[in-house]
Amino acid sequence: MEPVQSEPRFTANIQPDTPKMSDGLKKVLTYALAATILLIVWIYVSSPLVVTVTGSGEVSVPATNATVSFTLSQSDNSIGGAVSGVSAKADQMRQYLISKGVGEGDIAQSQVTEVPAALVTAGASGYQATISMAAKTIHVTDVNNLVTDLYTNGALVVAQPVLSVENQNKLDQQALDAAMADAKSQAATIGNSNWKFIRKIISISQASSASTSTSTTKADTLTSANNATAASNGVFKIVKAVSVSYKMW
């Protein structure tokens, strides 16, 4: 009798059902997470870091022009004599300036002013007539000699020469650009150190030096105006300063 082979038996390993999250709970958690994210974003956006920085920029340039202002005067017992006398002085001074290389279009002259001499000098008699003149010359290195010659030729008072440069607007813009770049660099340093990478300018105010100068400094290798003109005429600086306020997020 042959042995009877039994059929193999398989035992199923049935694990208990894992509890599933209900749809309602999922919605609650989703809304809570969204609300938390929105709250963080709202706090971040509504509380920016406000920073104000001051940037400065300067341009060193050689002086290209010098303007000299002076006054002529003539006294006489009659108004007509005083006026004709000071007018003759003005004509002579104009011719002298032209001979020194000053263009006729660069010479300005005021109207004649006449006053009783007693208003100028106590006890004086007659009348005094005056004319104000100004001359712009490109011979900057010779301006001191020009002042001396003006006195020699009859000038009553000579003001200190005022130096200036050509292309003033272009130089002002260069100095302003440098000031804004300086402010931007400072703001970037502050923003990066505080993890604020989005920046918006909310206000700008600026100040500048006068566009003319009465003195110069010697040119050197550190100035952008290091050339023959700067070496002879000297240089002066055009300075711009800006105060820039940023919002940073």
Image (tube, helix red, strand yellow):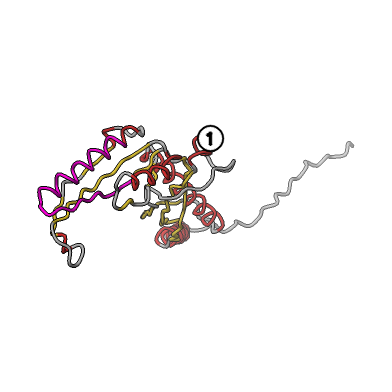
Please provide percent x and percent y for residue 192: 55, 54
> As drawn, is 173 to the left or to the right of 119?
right
In which image quadrant can residue 15 be found?
A: bottom right
Q: Give the labeled residue for mark 1.
A: 227
Q: Is residue 11 above or below residue 103?
A: below
Q: Kindly state the secondary structure of the residue where label 1 is placed.
A: loop
Residue at 48% x, 50% y is: 184
Residue at 33% x, 51% y is: 158
Badge 1 amino acid = Asn
The boundaries of the magenta stretch are 68-96
Please provide percent x and percent y for residue 239: 44, 50
Magenta highlight on residue 9 = no
Front residue of 196/245: it is 245
> As drawn, is 114 to the left or to the right of 54?
left
Magenta highlight on residue 81 = yes
Residue at 39% x, 36% y is: 138
Please provide percent x and percent y for residue 59: 47, 44
